[in-house]
């Protein structure tokens, strides 16, 4: 898309009118920065399509997408009327598309501030690590659990991601375990709550290509049981045992009194 005639024309027009003196603009009067996000998300499987969305203003007459903090536009777009956002399509995600992106929009002859950086990661370039949970896949609320990501392949960093979670991925440097002949990283979770239950995956990456991740591990589902319910069950069982013991003691005491009453009679 960036190499098409239309895109080059848009780039020239936008830069002639808006990019000149970009770094010398006075902050006063510059439109506020837009928001930026990726669909279906910031971690894209190799070969899959992705759309980078930039949302600015209904008055915006043009959008610019920058890659790798470059000063030259990577893509440009003119929004449809009465729509305050535009999408930049990546037809097939590859390692060349991975990296940080920022966007800006133009309105009334002024270029907005740059958006916050959006990091796109491509996953699926190499073999997958494995993911396990210790002490187990089911843990009571309030307890601790560790998720272990490991691989025989050499990875500098492991990444842990919770599906449908609002939290960003966790990252940990890998360590070589000679006894197991594997690279691994431990992700402590806890004291756990019900919100931390769900499906997790992990990935590996190298320092030379930090935005190119391995294939995903098999999904791991972590179950969190309600600690309060467990306590009630324990209390109920304990109470039942006490009742049974009380009945047995009462019967034993009553049986010892019977001979005494018979002798008195």
Image: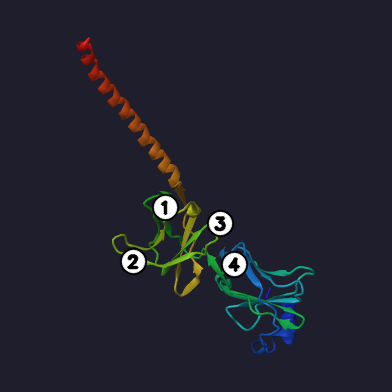
Q: What x and y, as percent, mark residue 189?
A: 42, 58
**Residue 118 seen by the camera:** yes
Specify which label sits upstream in the sequence, 3 or 2. Answer: 3
Residue plotted at (50% across, 64% down):
169
Q: Provide the residue designation for mark 2.
A: 176
Looking at the rendering, in which quadrant would you find the N terminus? bottom right
Specify which label sits upstream in the sequence, 1 or 2. Answer: 1
Specify which label sits upstream in the sequence, 4 or 2. Answer: 4
Instruction: Give the quarter of the image for residue 172.
Output: bottom left
Residue at disc 1, secondary structure: loop
Distance Cα–Cα, label 4 vs label 3: 21 Å
Q: Are discs 3 and 2 less than 8 Å apart at CB?
A: no
Q: Provide the residue designation for mark 4.
A: 93
Distance Cα–Cα, label 3 vs label 1: 22 Å
Name the mark on residue 250. none
> Within 10 angstroms of label 4, few (less than 14), some, or many (20 or more) residues?
many
Q: What x and y, as percent, mark residue 118?
A: 58, 71
Q: Are discs 4 and 3 less than 8 Å apart at CB?
A: no
Residue plotted at (44% across, 74% down):
207
Distance Cα–Cα, label 3 vs label 2: 31 Å
**Front one among 165 and 16:** 165
**Residue 138 seen by the camera:** no
Residue plotted at (65% across, 78% down):
74
Looking at the rendering, in which quadrant would you find the C terminus? top left
Specify which label sits upstream in the sequence, 3 or 1. Answer: 1
Q: What x and y, as percent, mark residue 91?
A: 65, 66
Residue plotted at (29% across, 64% down):
178
Distance Cα–Cα, label 1 vs label 4: 40 Å
């Amino acid at each position: 898309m960036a190499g098409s005639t239309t895109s080059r024309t848009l780039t020239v027009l936008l830069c002639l009118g808006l990019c000149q003196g970009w770094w010398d603009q006075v902050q006063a009067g510059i439109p506020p920065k837009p928001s930026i996000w990726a669909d279906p998300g910031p971690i894209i499987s190799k070969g899959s399509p992705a759309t980078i969305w930039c949302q600015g203003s209904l008055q915006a007459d043009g959008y610019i997408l920058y890659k790798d903090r470059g000063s030259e536009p990577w893509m440009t777009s003119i929004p449809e009327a009465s729509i305050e956002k535009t999408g930049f399509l990546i037809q097939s995600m590859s390692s060349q598309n991975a990296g940080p992106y920022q966007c800006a929009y133009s309105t009334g002859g002024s270029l907005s501030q740059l958006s916050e950086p959006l990091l796109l990661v491509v996953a699926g370039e190499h073999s997958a690590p494995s993911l396990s949970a210790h002490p187990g896949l089911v843990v009571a609320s309030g307890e601790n659990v560790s998720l272990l990501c490991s691989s025989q392949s050499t990875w500098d960093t492991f990444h842990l991601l919770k599906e449908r979670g609002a939290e960003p991925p966790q990252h940990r440097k890998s360590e070589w375990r000679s006894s197991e002949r594997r690279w691994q990283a431990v992700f402590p979770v806890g004291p756990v709550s019900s919100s931390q239950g769900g499906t997790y995956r992990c990935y590996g990456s190298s320092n030379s290509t930090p935005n190119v991740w391995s294939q995903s591990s098999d999904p791991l589902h972590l179950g969190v049981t309600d600690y309060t319910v467990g306590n009630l069950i324990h209390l109920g069982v304990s109470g039942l045992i006490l009742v049974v013991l009380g009945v047995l003691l009462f019967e034993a005491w009553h049986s010892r009194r019977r001979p005494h009453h018979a002798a008195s009679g």
